[in-house]
Amino acid sequence: TFAKYVKTDSAQDVAQVAKWGVVVETKLDDLFETAYDNATGTVQAANTYNILAPGTTDKQDDAFKISGTPEVAVNVNVEVDVKLTNWKLANDTVYCPLVISVNGTKYQIDATNTTTAKLEEAVEAAIREALGHGNHDAKTNLNKTVNIAWEWPFYTNDDNDVKDTYLGNQAEAGNAPTFGLDIKVTVTQVD
């Protein structure tokens, strides 16, 4: 017989690609209309452009949705641009009667949001927060939804009626007040 030394070692390893599965969906196409027919009457645009008027309201449920639980750390970058232009009266006073809601929280010109710029910033911040703007650890559930609504309420105040009429006359003169919303969401793996 022969004696011998024997040493054996063995190893195996397998890996699969980390799950991504992030879905970003938007549908802002129904936030404004060319016509409104509600309890207060009918509003109809002269052409095919979307309109706003006293007594009108609209909403977009699921305006933006993010879903997924990626197995990597991610950054959710939410770029929001709310534009409220030409909402000034003849005396250069800001008058924007719109009430904008993000996931049920209402934002409007008031003691907190005293200018259209401050109102824009408040709505933008609410949308960024609702969509989880920032960095997230691996395996974070990213499920977020933003519902957006707006309303131009009828007021029983004669002073507001005069202001509303002024804004309508500005539209006729080619200087229409507008409300625009642009949202872009990018989800990126963190290095």
Image (cartoon, rainbow, N blue to C red):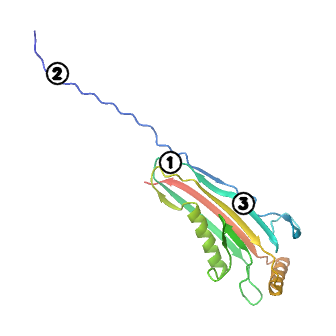
Distance of label 1 from label 3 (alpha carbons)? 27 Å
Q: In the rendered structure, which disc, 1 or 3, sits on the residue that comes first in sequence?
A: 3
Looking at the image, which is closer to me, 105 or 26? 105
Q: Amino acid at mark 2?
A: Val
Amino acid type for the residue under numbered disc 3: Gln
Residue 40, image x and y in percent?
Answer: 87, 70
Under circle 2, the secondary element is loop
| 6 relative to 157, above or below | above
Q: Are marks 2 and 1 in contact (CB under 8 Å)?
A: no
Q: Which residue was labeled with disc 2?
A: 6
Residue 12, percent from left and from top: 33, 30
Quarter of the image for residue 26 reads bottom right
To which quarter of the image does residue 79 belong?
bottom right
Q: In terms of secondary structure, where does tag 1 sit? A: loop
x then y, percent, for residue 83: 68, 72
- Residue on which the image places disc 1: 70
Using a 10 Å C-alpha cutoff, classify the residue at mark 3 as few (fewer than 14 neighbours), some (14 to 19) or many (20 or more).
Answer: some
Say which residue appears at 68% left-offset and 79% top-offset.
109
Q: Quadrant of the C terminus?
A: bottom left
Q: Which residue is mark 3?
A: 60
Label 3, secondary structure: give it: strand
